[in-house]
Amino acid sequence: MKKKIYFIISAILQMISSVYLISKADTVYSNTLSSMEKVYSSFPVEFQNRLLDMMNNSGIYFILVPAIICIIANAIILILAFGNYIEKRRAFLIFLSIICIIFGSTTVSTILAIVNFVILLSMKKISEPDNKKEKKKIPEVKKVKYNNNELWSSIIIVLVYFSQFVWGNMISKDNILISTLVSICFYVLMFILVIVLFNDKIFNDFKKLKKNFSAYLEYDLPKYGFMFISFIIVNFLCIIVTKNATSVNQEAVEKLPKIMLLILSVFWAPIVEEVVFRGTIRRFINNNWIFIITSSLIFGFMHAINEYSLIDVIMTTLPYGVLGGFLAYFYTKTDNIANNMMIHGIWNFFAMIMSLLVSIIM
């Protein structure tokens, strides 16, 4: 009962502080803009300019959008608290608290969100009465011995995927039409190859995901929040070291046509990359930690391969390596490639939306 009252009060206070911020958006925006030079003076110049341009072009929306996100998140928390779903929806509430920490627009909102997060983490899982239906859990992971056909299929997928770094350098970047057509052919070929050679695993795992969707979702959400925060922190530190706000890989992606960006980011990459960097590697490495480290390093390096200097390669590999490490961890715990594809797809979708918003604003 005490927790219910606390979360109700916390949500109401955060919503009030966000509403107050919205009512004073013009003043807050002006004060934030004027204090930019002092607050961010120690940050890389490129980062300062990028943030300043975004603030100038977005206007008070720079203040309004995070505040609205906090209001929506706390409205959901309020509903769950009133409905006595705090224990039952603990994982989802942890995720919402992380969202409030990230987008906390006021000091009050951020502090309360952190307290929410700590309380939810310290809560013990409630034990269900014997007469109640047992709560669904994700299917137990069993050790699988792969046959030669599966191992050779994995080798073929990896070789074809990495072949792009051989033939890619042979195609002139000046001829945009030829370069685009070859790239499209590669994307289509890679997609077909993955579906054909990995079809049993993909379709069986999609069936498991569909059947146990709520269990997978409850398992994923808290860890998804940790993945989000870890990536942001590491990426932020790497930006300070390299003094670059975006990687070469990110710049290249942002130049793609929007429809192609949507297809590659939300559909192609989650399916193909999860098979290449998680599914195939797992077939050759049984040890969980060696698998996580290997998948993390290869995934991170692949996103940094086009950087211009060694320090840029390392600093770009780190944040993507964190992302790859979390995805590999998910795979060791679920052995479900479809679940990984869902997590990866949602991540890329939000990253794409944020990139599009920034490009529109700027």
Image: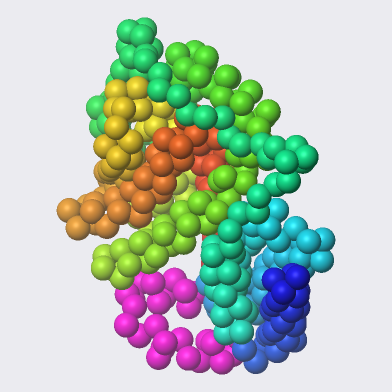
The C terminus lies in which quarter of the figure?
Answer: bottom right
Return the residue nearer the eye: 264 or 195.
Answer: 195
Return the residue nearer the eye: 110 or 261.
Answer: 110
Q: Position of residue 345 (x, y in %)?
A: 55, 41
* Left or right of 84, for residue 65: left
At 53% from the left and 87% from the top, the residue drawn is: 33
The N terminus lies in which quarter of the figure?
Answer: bottom right
Q: Position of residue 147 (x, y in %)?
A: 36, 9
What range of the chain is rendered magenta?
29-53
Is residue 346 located in the magenta-colored stretch of the structure? Answer: no
* Residue 307 appears anywhere in the view: yes
Q: Position of residue 289 (x, y in %)?
A: 30, 40
- Residue at the extreme left: 310
* Left or right of 211, for residue 237: left
Against 234, is 175 above or below? above
* Left or right of 309, for residue 46: right
